[in-house]
Image (cartoon, rainbow, N blue to C red):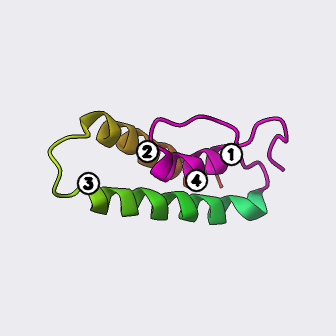
Amino acid sequence: MANPDISPFTLTFRFPEWQREYAAALLESDRAKLQKCIAAAETAILARLKALVDSTDHEQERMAIDDALHALRLLKQDG
């Protein structure tokens, strides 16, 4: 089970459109729930990428998304 002292809902995020779900996946320690959390994070990230598709701004967010997707791939491998 995730640490009850750390919640993705009490953290402040620079990119809240997808980082809450991403943090929830990173903090999930219950293997039975992990894949669902990873899927939710990937869905949120892909939705955000669709919203950014026509934008030339948001370079820092795009880099953060690349890092997050890499971390989620590693979580999948470990799970």
Expressed as whole percent of the image width and height from the top left, the position of residue 77 reads: 56, 53
Expressed as whole percent of the image width and height from the top left, the position of residue 69 reads: 43, 49
Q: CA distance from mark 2 to mark 4?
A: 15 Å
Residue 19 belongs to magenta span: yes
Provide the residue designation for mark 4: 21
Give the amino acid at mark 4: Glu
Give the structural element (helix, strand or loop) at label 2: helix
Mark 3 and mark 2 lie on one chain; the one further toward the N terminus is: 3
The magenta segment is 1-30
As drawn, is 58 to the left or to the right of 65? left
**Image quadrant assignment for residue 39:** bottom right
Report the residue at 57% width, 55% height from top: 76
Expressed as whole percent of the image width and height from the top left, the position of residue 9 reads: 68, 45
Residue 35 belongs to magenta span: no
Mark 1 and mark 3 lie on one chain; the one further toward the N terminus is: 1
Q: CA distance from mark 1 to mark 4?
A: 9 Å
Give the amino acid at mark 1: Phe
Provide the residue designation for mark 1: 9
Q: CA distance from mark 4 to mark 3?
A: 18 Å
